[in-house]
Image (spheres, rainbow, N blue to C red):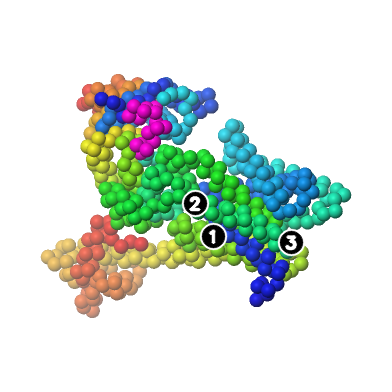
Amino acid sequence: MQSAIEVRDLTVAYRDHPVLWDIDLTVPAGVLMAIVGPNGAGKTTLIKAILGLVASAAGQVLILGKPYDKQRHIVGYVPQRGSVDWDFPTSVLDVVLMGLYGRLGWLRRPGRRERTQAMDALVQVGMEDLAARQISQLSGGQQQRVFLARALVQDADVYFMDEPLQGVDATTERAIIALLRELRSRGKTVLVVHHDLQTVPEYFDEIMLLNVRRIASGPVSEVFTAENLRLTYGGRIGFLKTPQSA
Amino acid sequence: MEVLTDYTLRTVALGALLLGAVSGALGSFAVLRKQSLLGDAISHAALPGIAIAFLLTGSKLPLVLMIGAALTGWLATLLVMQVTRNTRIKYDSALALMLSVFFGIGLVLLTVLQKMPYANQAGLDSFLFGQASSLVERDVVTMAFLGGIALVATGVLWKEFKLLSFDTDFGTSLGLPMRRLDITLTTLLVIAIVIGLQTVGVVLMSAMIIAAPAAARQWTDRLGIMVLLAMVFGAVSGVMGALFSAGTSRLPTGPTIVLCVTVIVIVSMVGAPKRGLLWRTVRQWRSGRRLRQSAVLMDLYALAGQHEEHEHPHALAVIEAMHPHTAQLRHKLLALAERGFVVQTGAAEWALTPAGVREAEQLLEGNGEIE
């Protein structure tokens, strides 16, 4: 079966300092995959480099077998919540509609059909009652769900999500995970930057351990081991219960 | 209405209206993109362009001078971007650097020009602080033409500019050419600044870019309305300032316009609903009062929990015992009664109403009515 994401030799450097070093990554289609690693490991940079948002010194990215540049229309992106100014004068519905700007093309404004699609996405994340709300009045979890809804209207095949569970409450976390599983059941592939090691086996099928280099990647059952975690985080992770030590 | 009949006044007012509206519109995007000071750098950097354009052509045609101004303004922006990208100098330092260097060159050139044996170089120094009365019809026609282009382009690229201002990376991920859109929007900002220079002057033109949008932001949470309001605020202060200064000889227009727009900014900062200082103070005071009322309501609810029916009345003394630090407990109970949550059942006895029980339960779930 064709892999959803294929990254070869991806290297990113800031000045002379490598941030990502020769990354190879294969993500099978239809899985939820977590990227984990310590702070400064390059998790966000990896996603941004794959999406062409930061310049890479070398490397190739294939999405469903074709170069990323030709596949942008089937790729969805959920940036970190803190990457935008939530005091921007716009409404929840308006932000979700932005997910359709690429498909709308020049000169066309979102019309009734687009608004219906955006409302559908808001229903999926349980935010339909807040469609008209100014975005500065949202809680952290609500901001996160608005970003998810914006990605949902893209109706992409491959999703990149940067810490979608960062700073959300337990209820929202469950809702978001349910949504990711729903995406998986529709055959979508989701690559998620994730922080909480404890929930990795419960939430994800595959995992990539990253610390500037790729330490390991593959099915959680094979790769999520104490040894790999030690290699990724150094000696600072002794308290964690892994399948082997538990 | 002198404005409608007097030719000079009408020209001046029309020019000021145009520059206020155009800079308000493009300034809104600059302010939202946290590039307020870029406008300042561009306008200061325009000064050498004006001098050089005159030196090369000997012409004071508005279009010629504006092109010169735009070119050096653009060059400064480009240099700011290059310096930020390729050196360790930060954005704000790069801006300040270009602003002062270009402005310095401009001042030197202007001084040199004054001493040259040209017949018609007089008046170029009015670009420092602006001189509305120097506007003639062909100036206004040029301003209208360039301003029209800037406004139409903003309308055409509206949703792209909105996305650029809110979330550039997401736009890139959609496959939109965000870099080119960035360059386009910055170019339009340069145009907006350049058409205002003759009237407002290079020193204070940035006020037209920043002040009106900042005031407009106070009144609305929608981008479209914000841009329209900023255009109106810019136009109004432009016209008022230009008329004041044109009516008084040698009163520079820039500072006068800035004083007008400052009044609008102060009124907006203080008086605007929701975001204004006044409104926020009142709201804080009211939500504090609500919170203290809710505390009393919750205590009544806790007391009622010890009885079969929630509407069981309790003596004031019992409630007071739970609130040793609450002054004027009676006032809070009366206020709650006004909202229909409690009812006085005896001389000093109070009980929850069914509505009060519901409110208490909602508060417990954390989605009660807290403003």
* Residue at numbered disc 1: B230
Q: Which amino acid does label 2 sit on?
A: Val
* Magenta segment includes A67: yes
Magenta part of the protein: which range? A61-76
Q: Look at 61% across and 48% down and name the residue there.
A: B190
- Residue B161, given in percent of the width and then of the height, sits at 49, 48
* Residue at numbered disc 3: B134
Q: Look at 65% across and 41% down and name the residue there.
A: B75
Residue B181 versus residue B238: which sits nearer the camera? B181
Q: What residue type is labelled 3?
A: Ser
- Residue B322, given in percent of the width and then of the height, sits at 27, 64
Question: What is the C-alpha distance between the residues marked 2 and 1?
Answer: 19 Å
Q: What residue type is labelled 1?
A: Ala
Evaluate whether label 3 is on the same chain as label 2: yes
Q: Which of the image's four quarters has the N terminus of chain B? A: bottom right
- Residue B361, given in percent of the width and then of the height, sits at 22, 61
For residue B229, side relative to residue A35 (left or right): right
Q: How many labels does the image show?
A: 3
Could one spot residue B65 in this view of the protein? yes
User: Seen from this angle, which residue lies furthest left?
Assistant: B308
* Residue at numbered disc 2: B156
User: Seen from this angle, which residue lies furthest right?
Assistant: B117
Helix, strand or loop at disc 1? helix
Residue B286 versus residue B301: which sits nearer the camera? B286
Q: Look at 19% across and 71% down and name the residue there.
A: B313
Mark 3, chain letter?
A: B
